[in-house]
Structures are given as C-alpha cells and as structure tokens.
Image (cartoon, grey):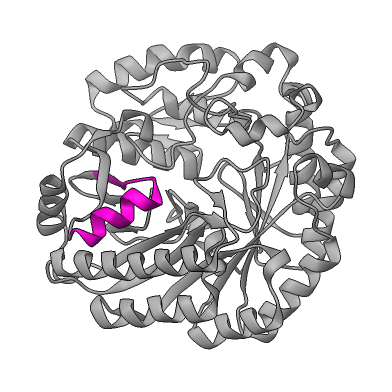
Amino acid sequence: MTDAPMPSRDLLALAEARVPRYTSYPTAAQFGALEEATYREWLREGIGAADPLSLYLHVPFCRDLCWYCACHAKPTRSDARVAAYGAALRAELDLLAAALPAHGGISHLHFGGGTPSILKAEGLGLLLAAIRARIGIRPGAELAIELDPRLMDEALVEGLGALGFTRASLGVQDIAPEVQARIGRPQPAEMVRVGVERLRRAGITGINLDLMYGLPAQTVAHVEASARFAAELRVPRIAVFGYAHVAWMKPHQKAIDASLLPGASARMEQAEAAEAVLRAAGYVALGLDHFALPEDPLAIAADEGRLRRNFQGYTTDTAPALLGLGASSIGALRGGFAQNIADERRYAEAVAAGRLPVARGVATTEEDRLRAGLIERLMCDFALDLCAVPDVMLVDAMARLGPLERDGLVRLDGAHLLVPPAGRRFVRQVAACFDAYWQPAAQRHSAAV
C-alpha cells in the first residue's frame, strides 16, 4: 500500500456497510444442511494422488472467554473435558484418514481456537503423532498454532519446539491496560515480549502478532503505541483487524459497552495510523489487513502475485484441499465447503458413532469457483484482469461497480480493474460486486472498515 488521503466523510456509510470478509466463496452465509455421504463423495473425487493437503484443527476451549471474541469458543476449567475432546479429535482423524483417497500428505497444518494449547504439549503431541501415522506430513510442512500469551510458560513453548511447530500466532489486540480492561483481556505487554523471546529460543521463528482497532474507547494513540510495540519486536508478520461487534451472534460481546465503540471515521483513522507506523518500521502492507517484513514468504508471495486467502486469512498455502477437524471446523474441497457440528458434545457423539461429523456446507458450481478466483485476486492483488470475466458476469459487476468508480474507489484501466490506495480499505465492497449471492443485510456480516 502507498500513502493515501483519508476517504471523505461521504464514504462513512459505505465503511459501515456489512459485507463478507471473503475468506471463502460462497461464504458461510450460503451454508445449509450437508449429508455425510456428500462429504465423503467430495473427499473421494476431489483429491488427486499427488495433491498436498492442508489441515485445520479447531479447539473450541479457552480458560477465560475474551469479550471481543467472535470465534467459536467457550470457557472451561475442566481438564477432563479438554482431554475427552482431544480423544474425539483423534477418533475423527481415524475416520477422516479412512475416507481419504491416495494423496500427497499434509503441507500446511494449523491449530486454531479457542486456545489450542489448552491441550498442553502432551495432547498436541498425541494428535501430531496420529496425524503423521494416519495421513502423513510432508517434509518442510508448516505447522502453525494460535497461542494466548497469558498461557505460554517455558515448558509449553519448549514442548511446541520439540514437536516441530514452525509458526505461532499471538493475540495482542492492544497493549493499553485501559483498553484491555474494556475487552476482558488483561495482558501486560511484557508478557507478550517474553512469549516472543521464548518462541525464538525454542526455534519457532515464524511469529505472527494480531492487533485490533475499533475497540471500546480505543484511540489513534492507543493503536499507534500497539503497532510500535509489535514492530519493535521485529516479528515477521503482523495483522491489524477491525473489531467486529456482532453481539447478535456472540452474546458475550454484550459485556462490551457499545456506546464506547469508535465510529466509522475513527475506525478509518485508526487503521490508517497503524499502517503508517508499520510501514515506517519497514513492514510491507499486504491485502486488507496484513503486514510482513520484506523477506517473509508472505511478502514475497504478494510481490509475485501468489498470495492466497482462506479461513485463516492471508496465506502462502496452495494446497487444493483444506480438511477441517474438530467441532465447527470448515473444510474446502473442489466439490464444496463442509462444516462440522459446532456443539462439541454432539460432535463427539457423532464421531463415537463412526460418523464423519459434518453438519453444514454448500456445493460449489463452476461459476462459483470462477467467482471465487476473481474475488480472491481482488482481495490479494487489488487488481483484476477483466478479460478473465465472462461477459454476462462482467455486465452485472460493472453495474455494481459504477458508484464505487464515481467515488474513486476503483479505476478501470483498459481491460484491468484497479483498486487505488484510496479504495483499498473498501476492497470488500469491490469484491461484493462479483458475488452472486450477496445482499445488503444489517446483521449478517461485520462492518467493512
């Protein structure tokens, strides 16, 4: 990204519009009931003998639930409950491995949550051993895990290093105690610093820090201080997400005083401020909300037009099949998207009965896959070759793009559509012009900026 003036106040309504984040297409809003037999068919027919696989494992537990969280997560203090869930994950892995055709093994593995490390190094070790035995992990595969800095003691981090993890993502959000108090996440900055140092000593050098803007009573000064803190640690990747207040879907967010949430203008100022700090510190801006050091593979992929986007955000993962494991996890195959049962008890019951625990999903058509590719390139490259768009699709998209072009948020340059710097915070609206399903809805998606 390059320096750009703040979008005019005439665009505030557009910034507040609710549009998908486009980590998939079709989006989860189009998911409906999915039969196990259909999922098995997608597995059987959608994976080639040499295809690498990507595996996402969801652990829906935290010790405490942060008020801002929009993930599928729940608090628990029961080690027995966590251990039972780990056993269910291994049982599902057996079922999934038996359903897979010949393949090329796992190239990317991501533990998400919740707080996956709640399984402890022992539980994670059992899962990794089972994955290696039942599916196989390719040499040089990326093994990633999401971590809570408050739970990163020396023993855990050493255990992660011994297990071969190569990447860790730490939730920081904001380093100011007054902001942390308003989101239920007390976490001293020094705790994050120590966590990063422990990861490096354990040989885990692929480190991501997640920051947020748009939090209650958060200011530009808060966001700048947090961005400077992250940049001073020189971690390879930093994400700066806009807080999504979706209390109608996540009732625990009602603990946040919505009257203190920054408005659209303040949110845009905060996002711009974070970007300015990180770019000045030598980070490259990637896509909608990611930053990386120039030598990081994510920055290199973006420079070469190979940046990808999936449920974990921006990625270098090129595996043609993403498999979901665990309650609420989502997989992506050529045939469609498949999501597991969300409730962990019903999920475990289905697995115990010998059933792949899928519940929801959507089949994809050739048109869906074409649109998905167009949307992904827009979200990653801020540009699109219009020659790749069928005429009937292009006519519809151009009608939607008209107002955005008049506002200077997109530019048509011959056969290319370009999203200039002033429009990049609005790229989700640009992508929505190529979405055959999207309809404006007050309570379906998060605010655009």
Vertical comparison of 399 with 258: above or below:
above
Given residues 106 and 361, the one toward you in this image is 361
Q: Position of residue 251 (x, y in %)?
A: 59, 31
Instruction: Write the residue at 15% across / 48% down.
Output: 36
Vertical comparison of 296 with 24: above or below:
below
- Quarter of the image for the C terminus: give it: top right
Q: Position of residue 123 (x, y in %)?
A: 47, 76
Outermost residue to the bottom: 162
Left or right: 437 in relation to 118: left
- Residue 224 showing in the rendered view: yes
Vertical comparison of 214 with 161: above or below:
above
Instruction: Write the residue at 44% across / 29% down.
Output: 431
What is the total number of numbered labels drawn onto the structure image?
0
Q: Position of residue 80 (x, y in %)?
A: 49, 68
| Segment colored magenta | 337-353
Given residues 79 and 256, the one toward you in this image is 79
- Quarter of the image for the N terminus: give it: top right
Instruction: Write the residue at 75% across / 52% down.
Output: 279
Instruction: Write the residue at 89% across / 41% down.
Output: 221
Quadrant of res 45? bottom left
Q: Is residue 339 magenta?
A: yes
Quadrant of res 408? top right
Given residues 323 and 305, the one toward you in this image is 323
Q: Position of residue 343 (x, y in %)?
A: 39, 46
- Residue 140 showing in the rendered view: no
Q: Is residue 344 magenta?
A: yes
Left or right: 394 in relation to 36: right
